[in-house]
Image: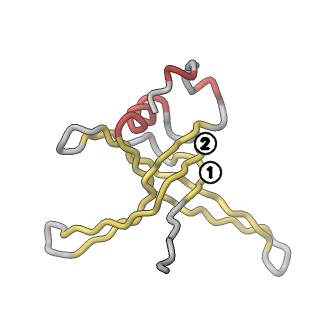
Amino acid sequence: MASRGLNRVQVIGNLGADPEERHSDSGTPVSNLRVAVNRRWKDAEGNPQEHTEWISVVAFGPLAEVCNEYLNKGREVYVEGRMQTRSWEDGEGNRRYRTEVVAQDVIFLGQRSQAPEMEEEEVPF
């Protein structure tokens, strides 16, 4: 029997910039997000340490439209999706790779005043 894989990512962090809004060649809305996830610990001597991991996130369709309209730099978000690596050839003929999370759900955290007040039936996704 073949085994099944699982590709599921969950991230909570803060946006490092406003979403980058664009449309695909077919006209589908796209939102590119950069999410900063901080990790804090104490080293062997008890000194506090911190590391920030930057995670690229891409959302499509109605989810992208909501992200583009209501998210902004600094906003805390929960992102759930799958990991994907794409490759392409740049203008100089070099092979480039990008690993990103393809969002299936984005939940706005933190200050509610920045998010719209929506009834459940108004949520487009």
Q: Which amino acid does label 2 sit on?
A: Glu
Disc 1 crowd rating (10 Å Cα; few below 14, some 14-19, many 20+) is some
Q: How many marks?
A: 2
Residue in front for this viewpoint, 81 or 30: 81
- Residue 43 located left or right of residue 79: right
Q: Are marks 2 and 1 in contact (CB under 8 Å)?
A: yes
Q: Is mark 2 on a helix, strand or loop?
A: strand
Q: Could you say which disc has been placed on residue 97 in the image?
A: none
Q: Residue at x 40, y 65 (%)?
A: 99
**Residue 56 picture quarter:** bottom left
Nearest to viewer (mark 2 / mark 1): 1
Disc 2 crowd rating (10 Å Cα; few below 14, some 14-19, many 20+) is many
Query: For the view shown, which residue lies furthest in the right direction?
Result: 46
Query: For the view shown, which residue lies furthest in the front direction?
Result: 1
Q: Which amino acid does label 1 sit on?
A: Ile
Q: Where is residue 58 in the image (x, y as percent from the top left)?
A: 40, 50
Residue in front for this viewpoint, 72 or 3: 3
Q: Could you say which disc has been placed on residue 76 in the image?
A: 2
- Residue 49 located left or right of residue 60: right
Q: Where is residue 53 in the image (x, y as percent from the top left)?
A: 56, 63
- Residue 40 located left or right of residue 54: right
Q: Could you say which disc has been placed on residue 12 in the image?
A: 1
